[in-house]
């Protein structure tokens, strides 16, 4: 039963090979979807291009449904999957700062790698900025530590937090996604097509 | 005219097709490794590695960096570093096949290249800082978190995109 590498059904030596192959596909899919262009990415915030919303929501919905099926059918043990801990305060503040960084810089970390990969200097500079941000965070860590560690709910899903079963979570998230796809398509009809 | 003579610079995949493939890839990643995709963690490892080479004592005494230093294992020998190296290669192949791979600075005609680079640097600093505070970025915290219905995934998705919409108005002249 999966996950294969943690359960030692595939030897750990394969770990980095698997990482390279998965990463290659990750980069290819993002670039081919237009995520190497900052002007396309931020279109989601100004209403002229909703590619980010469509790709992101579709990927999340497909992954949720797939992982739920794999665990129901016994191919993967859901309890063995990594659920990152929810530190409510730091995830909200950190997320808002990332949102600001997104509209200022035009990328997120993954997409800046794609941009740099096809030779965009602004992508490369963004990556340099990311590293500076990490340094800044580390140097000020003593002042940030209490915020960083506040409100730890542990590795919880919406089942524990809201009492929403996984099935209902997937259903509601998919429904929200379909409504969002429909509304953004309506908005898109009124906006002139831009090439960048 | 053959495929190779045409201009494919603006031919992007249908976003639902790209999203579908990304979702399948995410399922495969969880099935193989038990974890999701990521990006910002690789930048962090690179910083820890570089500083550990320059100033090992500073890194070992730092309350934050020292969490990521293990004896007899390079900070660069992580899953995410290999994943990110693969991602750069994958992006290059896709861009090269579509005629998009070339050195350039992309920006709106309303701003200069210099301003674009300053904004890219500032945005990077903010995103880098925020991703450490939130323990992950759009791929590691939001997308991978959503795949396993983690509360942190939903909250970080709402905070990142909510933050974007909240501040978008003030930076509109740089983009439109």
Image (cartoon, coloured by chain):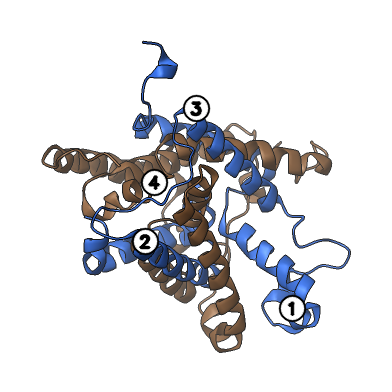
Q: Residue furthest left?
A: A190
The chain coloured brown in the image: A
Give the x, y percent position of residue A102. 38, 61
Residue at 76% over, 43% down: A15
Q: Which residue is mark 2?
A: B116
In contact (CB < 8 Å): disc 3 and disc 1: no
In the image, which is nearer the foreground, mark 1 or mark 2? 2
Q: Chain of mark 2?
A: B
Establish if A82 lies above or below B72: above
Q: Are marks 4 and 3 in contact (CB under 8 Å)?
A: no
The answer, for residue B104, to whether it is visible in the render is: yes
**Residue lying at 41% horizontally and 67% vertically, measured from the top left:** B118
Sequence-wise, which precedes: disc 1 or disc 2? Answer: 1
In the rendered view, tell whether residue A116 sits above or below residue A129.
above
Report in which chain the residue with disc 1 lies: B
User: Badge 2: few (under 14), some or many (20 or more) residues near its Cα, within 10 Å?
Assistant: many
Q: Label 3's element?
A: helix
Which residue is identified by label 4?
A: A37
Q: Colour of chain B?
A: blue
User: Disc 2 to disc 4, how far (Cα)?
Assistant: 13 Å
Which subunit holds the residue at mark 4?
A
| Structural distance between the alpha carbons of marks 1 and 2 | 32 Å
Label 4 SS: loop
Residue with the mark numbered 1:
B59
Callout 2–callout 3 Cβ contact below 8 Å: no
In the rendered structure, find residue B97 and report the number of the disc placed on it: 3
Compute the Cα span from label 4 to label 1: 35 Å
């Amino acid at each position: 039963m999966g996950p294969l590498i943690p359960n030692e059904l595939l030897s750990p030596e394969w770990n980095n090979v698997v990482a390279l192959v998965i990463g290659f596909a990750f980069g290819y899919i993002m670039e081919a979807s237009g995520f190497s262009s900052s002007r396309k990415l931020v279109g989601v915030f100004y209403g002229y291009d909703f590619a980010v919303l469509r790709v992101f929501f579709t990927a999340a919905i497909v992954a949720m449904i797939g992982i739920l099926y794999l665990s129901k059918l016994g191919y993967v043990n859901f309890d063995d999957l990594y659920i990152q801990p929810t530190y409510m305060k730091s995830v909200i503040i950190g997320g808002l700062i990332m949102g600001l960084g997104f509209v200022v810089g035009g990328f997120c970390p993954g997409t800046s790698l794609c941009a740099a990969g096809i030779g965009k200097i602004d992508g490369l500079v963004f990556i340099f900025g990311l590293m500076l941000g990490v340094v800044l965070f580390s140097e000020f860590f003593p002042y940030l530590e209490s915020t960083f560690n506040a409100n730890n709910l542990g590795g919880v899903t919406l089942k524990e937090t809201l009492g929403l079963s996984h099935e209902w979570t997937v259903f509601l998230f998919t429904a929200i996604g379909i409504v969002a796809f429909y509304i953004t398509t309506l908005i898109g009809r009124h906006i002139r097509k831009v090439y960048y | 005219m053959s495929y190779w003579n045409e201009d494919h610079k603006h031919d992007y995949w249908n976003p639902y097709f790209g999203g579908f493939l990304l979702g399948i890839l995410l399922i495969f990643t969880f099935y193989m490794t038990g974890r999701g995709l990521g990006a910002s963690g690789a930048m962090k490892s690179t910083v820890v590695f570089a500083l550990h080479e320059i100033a090992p004592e500073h890194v070992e005494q730092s309350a934050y960096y020292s969490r990521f230093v293990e004896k007899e294992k390079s900070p660069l020998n992580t899953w995410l570093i290999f994943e990110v190296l693969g991602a750069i290669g994958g992006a290059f192949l896709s861009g090269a096949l579509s005629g998009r791979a070339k050195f350039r600075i992309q920006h709106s005609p309303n701003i200069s290249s210099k301003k674009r680079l300053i904004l890219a640097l500032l945005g990077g600093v903010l995103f880098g800082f925020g991703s450490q505070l939130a323990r992950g970025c759009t791929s590691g915290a939001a997308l991978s978190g959503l795949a396993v219905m983690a509360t942190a995934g939903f909250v970080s998705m709402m905070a990142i995109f909510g933050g974007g919409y909240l501040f978008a108005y003030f930076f509109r002249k740089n983009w439109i």
